[in-house]
Image (cartoon, helix red, strand yellow):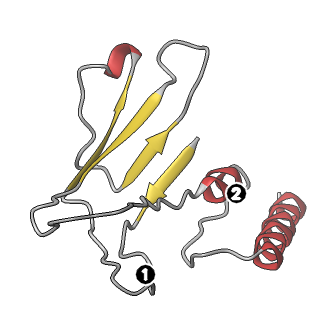
């Protein structure tokens, strides 16, 4: 699962480029949650699965009211699959973006904490 969060302005430095942030965002699920709209959620979940009820799709809405002409457009969305993977180790990621050395540091800290808990039990 990829969880998108904190959709903020992209770093657009090209001449003549503009940044347009989403006006609205939401994700939807299939299965028993098919009738629900998760527009109030703090993350956008995206997941493809062969198991019914495990699929999630994300939607973003942009206003183009200030755009008169455009020769090209890019939508930049940054995923955060690493935080979902680390959560299984009991790691809560608060500082983004994560560098590979920081990911390994968080894994080492989680393992050390787990070992300490096991020794105290």
Against 13, residue 38 (above or below) is above
Question: In the image shown, does 59 or 34 lie closer to the viewer?
Answer: 59
Tell me if mark 2 has few (under 14), some (14-19) or many (20+) residues whose alpha carbon lies within 10 angstroms of its own: some
Question: In the image shown, does 45 or 9 lie closer to the viewer?
Answer: 9
Mark 1 or 2, which is nearer the eye? 1
Q: Helix or strand or loop: what does disc 2 sit on?
A: helix
Residue positioned 42% across, 75% down in the render? 10
Q: Residue 22's x, y, as percent?
A: 25, 60
Against 81, residue 6 (above or below) is below
**Residue 31, image quadrant:** top left
Residue positioned 83% across, 78% down in the render? 101
Tell me if mark 1 has few (under 14), some (14-19) or many (20+) residues whose alpha carbon lies within 10 angstroms of its own: few
Residue positioned 36% across, 76% down in the render? 9
* Left or right: 73, with 100 as reference point: left
On residue 12, the disc is 1
Against 67, residue 53 (above or below) is above
Q: Residue 115's x, y, as percent?
A: 88, 63
The N terminus: image quadrant: top right
Q: Residue 52's x, y, as percent?
A: 51, 12
The C terminus: image quadrant: bottom right
Q: Residue 111's x, y, as percent?
A: 85, 64
**Mark 2, residue position:** 86
Against 83, residue 6 (above or below) is below
* Left or right: 109, with 40 as reference point: right
Residue positioned 46% across, 62% down in the render? 76
Give the mark nearer the N terminus: 1 vs 2.
1
Distance from the alpha carbon under mark 1 to that under mark 2:
30 Å
* Left or right: 36, with 117 as reference point: left
On residue 33, the disc is none
Q: Helix or strand or loop: what does disc 1 sit on?
A: loop
Q: Which residue lies most toward the left here?
A: 65
């Amino acid at each position: 699962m990829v969880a998108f969060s904190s959709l903020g302005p992209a770093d657009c430095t090209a001449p003549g480029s503009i940044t347009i942030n989403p006006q609205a965002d939401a994700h939807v699920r299939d299965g028993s949650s098919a009738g629900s709209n998760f527009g109030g959620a703090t993350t956008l979940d995206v997941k493809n699965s062969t198991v019914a009820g495990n699929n999630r799709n994300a939607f973003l809405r942009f206003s183009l009211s200030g755009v008169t002409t455009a020769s090209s457009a890019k939508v930049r969305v940054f995923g955060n699959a690493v935080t979902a993977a680390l959560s299984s180790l009991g790691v809560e990621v608060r500082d983004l973006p994560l560098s590979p050395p920081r990911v390994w540091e968080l894994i080492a800290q989680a393992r050390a904490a787990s070992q300490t808990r096991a020794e105290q039990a």
